[in-house]
Image (spheres, rainbow, N blue to C red):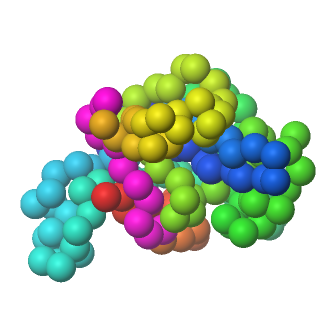
Amino acid sequence: MYNKTVTIFNYYESASAAVWYPHVLSGVDLITDKGAILKKYGPDSTDNAELHIPYTADKEKKIIVDNSGRNLFWIPPKEWQRQVNDDLPLSVTFGSDDFFIEGIWSKGMVNEDDYLRQNGFYNYINNQFDFVFKISSVGGPYTVIPHFEILGK
């Protein structure tokens, strides 16, 4: 348990640019067993992945450590969008515009305009790789066992 690595891609759009901020997280639990997901969430579930991300709390802040050991502050999606650009790489969110992949993305930030021919970066990644999941719902932050529970399609 908690032995997988994923990359979360957070989408940010301003008047001048649309950018994907990748955050590589190790020590997460990723379940892609459709039977286990159906058993837990019922036959109407259309999700293909269940992702558990642990966090630590520092007063009011939730901290998720990335695979390089850097602390990322979790911020709810609408608040994350209102940050200044310099703060975006130092924080993470889990919203309906975001997605995750199993494994490490090592190429840094992604400019959405570079993938317009492929109908955007998400579509490009989804067509090129396996284990790509659009975030469909988020549970948490849970406090008894501090973690987020993210479902993806």
Q: Which residues are magenta?
A: 128-138
**Foreground pick, 14 / 142:** 14
Residue 132 appears at what percent x and percent y?
35, 43
Tell me: residue 47, above or below residue 28: below
Q: Quadrant of the C terminus?
A: bottom left
Q: Is residue 107 visible from the viewing direction of this image? A: yes
**Foreground pick, 91 / 70:** 91
Q: Quadrant of the N terminus?
A: top left
Q: Residue at x 40, y 43 (%)?
A: 123
Q: Residue at x 20, y 64 (%)?
A: 37
Q: How many marks?
A: 0
Q: Main secondary structure of the magenta part?
A: strand
Q: Is residue 66 visible from the viewing direction of this image? A: no
**Foreground pick, 33 / 124:** 124
Residue 112 colored in magenta in the image: no
**Foreground pick, 145 / 133:** 133
Q: Which residue is at the far top? A: 107
Tell me: residue 41, above or below residue 136: below
Q: Residue at x 23, y 49 (%)?
A: 32
Residue 124 appears at what percent x and percent y?
41, 36
* 50 to the left or right of 74: left
* 44 to the left or right of 78: left
